[in-house]
Image (tube, rainbow, N blue to C red):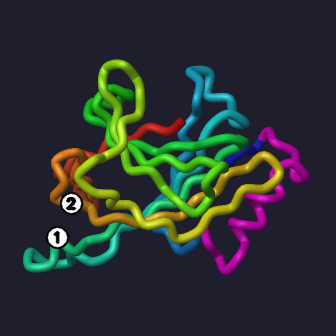
Amino acid sequence: SFFSATSEIDKQPFTTWLLATDNASSYDHSMFLPTTAEADPTNGMATFWKITGGDSDNDENDAKFHLAFATMATGWAAFGIAESGGMFGSDIVSFTTANPTTLIDGYILDDRQVRVDTHSQDWTLVSSTVEDGWIIVEATRRIDTGDGQDHALKNDKELWSPPSLIIAA
């Protein structure tokens, strides 16, 4: 279970989201991304995802990546598709509690500053929850946006396909 060291009372917004219309079960995959090397189960992000469409060579470009992430935070949270496993070169989507109806499509260069994608904003916000120190976001985007500032995701359901590298903040 994610956030296992967090009390049930403190975890209530996350638990409510998980149980609401079976949110967690609507995703094919999940993973906890710790924010520290020690992998403290209270510091990190629970991520859930699935890919729909793209079942044939003809509609691969229409495949969609559905993402949900949940973390204990009060100001912002971000999820990224990493170029090499770290922040540098990552394609990210960020959410701020100051503007809870908007996602920011961006990327990170060597100065570790988020740059807004100037070509297009490719993420669609499905829902967001900001409650009692929690940020929970659901969003979608095409796996290959055709935008040079976005990394194409791989539908890595086949064993021969390397996984996409991801980061969280």
The amino acid at mark 2 is Asp
Compare marks 2 and 1 and give the one earlier in the sequence. Answer: 1
Task: Establish if 145 lies above or below 116.
Answer: below
Residue lying farthest to the left in this orientation: 58
Instruction: Using the numbered discs, state the Cα–Cα distance from disc 2 to disc 1 in whole angstroms.
Output: 6 Å
Task: State the predominant SS element of the stretch in magenta.
Answer: helix
Tell me the amino acid under the disc marked 1: Asn
On residue 144, which mark appears?
2
Residue at screen point 65% across, 76% down = 22
Quadrant location of residue 60? bottom left
Chain part drawn in magenta: 5-24
* Mark 1 crowdedness (10 Å alpha carbons): few <14, some 14-19, many ≥20: some
Q: How many marks?
A: 2
* Location of residue 8 in the rendering, given as x and y in whole percent from the top left corner: 87, 52
Q: Residue at x 39, y 44 (%)?
A: 92
Residue 150 visible in the picture: yes
Q: Quadrant of the C terminus?
A: top right
Look at 59% across and 49% down and name the residue there: 46
Frontmost residue, 151 versus 119: 119
Give whichever of 111, 136 is nearer the camera.
111
* Disc 2 to disc 1: CB gap under 8 Å: yes
Quick check: 39 left or right of 73? left
The residue labelled by disc 1 is 61
Rendered location of residue 15, percent (x, y): 76, 61
Looking at this view, name the residue that lies furthest to the right.
9
What is the x, y in percent for residue 3?
Answer: 72, 44
Q: Is residue 14 left or right of residue 148?
A: right
The front one of 58 and 115 is 115
Residue 6 drawn in magenta: yes
Q: In the image, what residue occupies the spot 65% across and 49% down?
A: 98
Q: Is residue 16 left or right of residue 61?
A: right
Residue placed most toward the observer, 74 or 167? 74
